[in-house]
Amino acid sequence: MALPSVEEHTRATIRELFSFILAQGHTEYLGESVSQLQHSLQSALQAQQDNCDDETVLAALMHDVGRFIPAADKMPKLIAPDGSYIGRASHDILGERYLRQLGFSEKVCQLVGSHVTAKRYLCAAENGYWESLSLSSKRTLEYQGGRFTPEQVKEAENDPWLQEKLAVRRYDDLAKNPDAMTPPLEAYQEMAYKCLLESRSFINLNSRTYALPTKPTVVVCIDGFDPSYLRHGISTGTLPHLASLMEKGFSTTAKSAMPSITNPNNVSIVTGVPPSVHGIAGNTVLDRATGEEVSISDATHLRTETILSLLSRHGVRVAAVTAKEKLRQILGHQLHGAICFSAQKAKSCKLSQETDLDIETWMGRATPDQYSPDLSLFVMDAGVKLLDENRADFLYLTLSDWVQHKYAPGEKEADTFMTQLDVSIGRLLELGARVAITGDHGMASKTKPDGTPNVVYLQDELEARFGKGSARVICPIADPLVKHHGSFGAFVRVYVSSEYKESISEMIKYCATLEHVDVSLSATDAAERFELPLDLEGDFVVTSGRDSVIGSCRKDHDIGSLGGLRLRSHGGIAEQDVPLILSCPVQDGAAAAERKWRNFDVFDLVLNW
């Protein structure tokens, strides 16, 4: 059963689509003796009379949709040598793309997108077909690529929908009778609604399929959710709701993406793929063109759509609430009409695009201190309020790791914070939500026995060995929240100066000999092992072990920003383990038990399992 919001959005989508078709009215159809609307309706009727399925009937009805949607005005006009207008370039491809964005089935989209290529196929493969075409259709063929070559004909014959595509083409050819009687456009409206609603029951992104939610659904990303916090809370009885979920639902330990830091993992979670696909490989990256370090705080580097934006486009009321402002624009990418705000900027964020109500006023509380547990608790309270007021169907709540950076499991501050999170999770469950919980990365102590930070200053080490200016070390964990970690993480990228490029292999080997270094890998090896975009890598990558971090130069890091507390951080292989929890049992327990889960499988888990 579809969500009411999805049903309502689907009906509104069909009304708008049909308004575009109806607006054609009696406009001329490319010099033929019928109007564009008559042509569309006659095509659909031909398909019905051939007892075609609903998808083929709708494809016949909408095969020219690329001519009259608003985007068609941006396509170049096709003008014959005599100056007459004979159509729009690529209207078939434009129509296919438009219908796919609306959520129509792949069959409908391909049949609409192929009615021009079907004509090209028939002109090459069927004797007498070209002669049967109208003068207008013959003229447009010249601008549409002409007849297929023998190789193209052979390739087309492997298409499982070839016959349906050719049928739609024939209906197009026959739909030019000025005296034909047809049902009105509204006769197809319910058919279109049912077809679209069915195809909108799932979405496809990055070679993965996700069912649309059928009840309120929440995904919580607990920043810095090392499994040790969960184990401690369960053992002490301070996390009753999480304990209940682990007993009655599904739980396992998953691996995060690399580097195990905030931006790459939050983006992996909302896209369902590793950084090699989505393109966000750090909180900070080096712009090779300018030599400047760039903080990633928007979707400029994002290479794919998000699951959130696709759900929203299919009518699901989406809310993305983040503790950190740096994630808001990334999570809000293409989220039109959805709720998206950060706790960090609650005073300046609006609840929605349709209201001037700011988040502070709506929540009835001030913007929390960014260096406090309340930043995360604000997000959880906002999620509860959104559900309670029935403002969203699918919520993504992503928190801050301020507490985890400062306090280990068992310390009072950490235990209090985790207990408060557990209470909020309980409220989400009480409101009837299906809840999934994971983390973006783990967390570990990075100190020596005396309590001082255990740091390898890698750029200093490289310059001491190979010469001043030989290499530059970039710490991708770096972000504006320096009090969390002092820009110390367990993963760095090394960029070698041009005059030292021949020493890269030697540098990689040298780094591997340094105390506390875990792995030292070439860019190619790192991209393959850690599923990273090779074009964004440095010359090589170095990671440290669980009890240490890597910095660049001693002078570039302010240990004083840690506030005198012990350094706890993440970024490396050792911090990839995070809990993955679902509030109900999975459908196939055996398969779930055997699967090697990643934190970016959480949307798959909550929507499909």
Image (cartoon, rainbow, N blue to C red):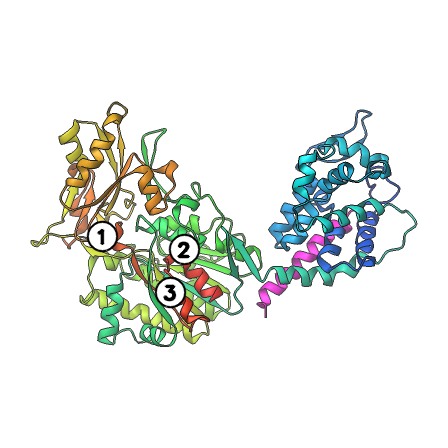
Side (left or right) of 369 relative to 43: left
Picture residue at 33% right of the left edge, 51% below the top:
262
**Which of labels 3 and 1 is toward the front?**
3
Contact, CB < 8 Å: mark 3 with mark 1? no
Q: Residues within 10 Å of mark 3 (few under 14, many from 20)?
A: few
Judged by its main secondary structure, the magenta piece is: helix
- The Cα–Cα distance between marks 2 and 1, rounded to whole angstroms, is 20 Å
Question: Percent from the top left, x then y, of residue 288?
Answer: 34, 31
Q: Which residue is mark 2?
A: 269
Residue 289 lies in quadrant = top left
Question: Percent from the top left, x then y, of residue 277?
Answer: 43, 45
Q: Quadrant of the N terminus?
A: bottom right
The boundaries of the magenta stretch are: 1-25
Question: Percent from the top left, x then y, of residue 551?
Answer: 20, 42
Picture residue at 34% right of the left edge, 42% below the top:
527
Q: Which residue is mark 3?
A: 594
Q: Is residue 85 above or below residue 208?
A: above
Contact, CB < 8 Å: mark 2 with mark 1? no
